[in-house]
Amino acid sequence: MQVHKFKIGDLAIVLDINSGAVHIVDDMVYDIVDVFNGANEAEVIAALAHKYEEPALREALGELRELIETGQLYTPELTVPLTFSDKPLVKSLCLHVAHDCNLRCGYCFAGTGDFGHSRGLMPKEVGERAVDFIIENSGQRRHCEMDFFGGEPLLNMDTVRHVVGYVRKREAETGKIFKLTLTTNALLLTAEIIQFLNDNHISLVLSLDGRPEVHDRMRPRVDGSGSYDRVLKHCKQVVASRGDQNYYLRGTFTAYNLDFAADVLSMADQGFSQLSVEPVVAKDADYALTEAHLPELFRQYELLAAEYLKRKLAGNGFDFFHFNLDLSNGPCVAKRLSGCGAGHEYFAVTPEGDLYPCHQFVGRDEYKLGNVYEGIQNCELPVKFRQAHVLNKPACRECWARFYCSGGCHANADLFHHDLRQPYELGCALQKKRLECAIMIQAKLAMVDQD
């Protein structure tokens, strides 16, 4: 497969897969690419003579040949070398400072905070050792990343504060530079905590599911009461304190709110500009998304894309994570093909110091890799994860989105197929729809810039 074509709204688009070139075309060219392979003009004319005049077809084919000659259409397949170090070269850790939570979210993959095991908080000493582990195993890499995670990490602010201080000390000693993030449900945010997070330049992922009734249905407190009002108040406080920067407001949609575009717009209408709303991943649950939901979900992404464009062009836009796509330099091929780095560049650390491939694998005991004190002990798993890239996944090798998508989430592949190399199909379908919307948006914005 060398091209992918699709229509959204009033645009017909042809994507040259290998170069990343995007072409807005008319109906005739849209039909031609179903037949044309770059060298079969006579076949194209014979197939479409009943619908279009031959001179028009020949003119269009001439224009397509020019695109081929300039490397913008039917580009030959890329050869992308993927190289990895002999042992894991760590760039990022997800620090589970709290295996406990003050919410009881209905869709929580973490078992409401305990990850299928006992509840507990990470001691400061384990946090320190995790910092040393990433420094010792990051090689010559100067930039490292660490996410304070849970459960709810604000339940263990003593360890968060201590580890941040230790990070700064070790940065000065080693020349490493850490990017710090904290993922929180925002319930426990106070003025003092907000000041600490801002002073230490800690990025935030804040959880809000959109409209009040949607949020409260799936994100109640321990006593069953709603959390929306308090969460919204605290999110507004912290976002205002950092000038609407350095955060994402992240939601989850389920079968209960298939009209999720309204939830994204609800968050935008509350004044937030950095948004991400993700599909729930679940099996055998009333709220789980299924293949039957796809037509409506596709429609919602198109509705959201249209409103995103409308607001962007009117000067009151917002950023939606899945619509952020740079078409100017084509896809970042090697990075996209190699995936997220789970299991060999990125690890999750439990309160006890155990290492897992990522936060979603925590609690799946067969995926325990080792611990921050003794390092990687299951040496076969990192190799398995390194090899689970797009080029080694049969379903991905022929997919038009292979240079934009990393082959899907490893944890979801394991959950649904017990096979890292067999992607979660519904996730793939939604990813491809989001990519089409993102390409359409960037094409529209480029058209406006040219006018």
Image (cartoon, helix red, strand yellow):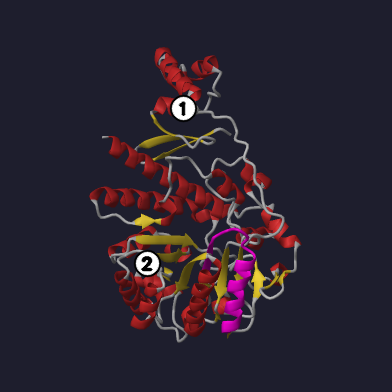
Helix, strand or loop under label 2: loop
Choose the circle earlier in sequence order: 1 or 2: 1
Q: Residue at x 66, y 74 (%)?
A: 372
Q: What residue type is labelled 1?
A: Asp
Image quadrant holding the N terminus, namely: top right
The residue lying furthest to the front in this view is 173
Disc 1 versus disc 2: nearer the observer? 2
Q: What residue type is labelled 2?
A: Gly
Locate residue 32, reporting x and y percent. Answer: 48, 24
The residue lying furthest to the bottom in this view is 223
According to the image, label 2 marks what residue?
210
> Marks 1/2: CA distance?
40 Å
Disc 2 packing (10 Å; few <14; some 14–19; many ≥20): many
Residue 133 on the magenta span:
yes
Q: Quadrant of residue 427?
A: bottom right
Q: In which quarter of the image is residue 424?
A: bottom right
Q: In which quarter of the image is residue 39?
A: top right
Determine whether 118 is above or below 349 in the image.
Answer: below
Side (left or right) of 71 relative to 89 = left
Locate residue 381, reporting x and y percent. Answer: 72, 61
Locate residue 78, reporting x and y percent. Answer: 60, 35
Locate residue 283, reporting x and y percent. Answer: 59, 65
According to the image, label 1 marks what residue?
31
Side (left or right) of 287 relative to 387 = left
Of the pair 417 and 133, the residue shown nearer to us: 133
Determine whether 346 is above or below 165 in the image.
Answer: above
* Residue 50, numbered label: none
Task: Tell me if label 1 and label 2 are in contact, CB under 8 Å.
Answer: no
Q: Give the range drawn in magenta.
A: 121-146
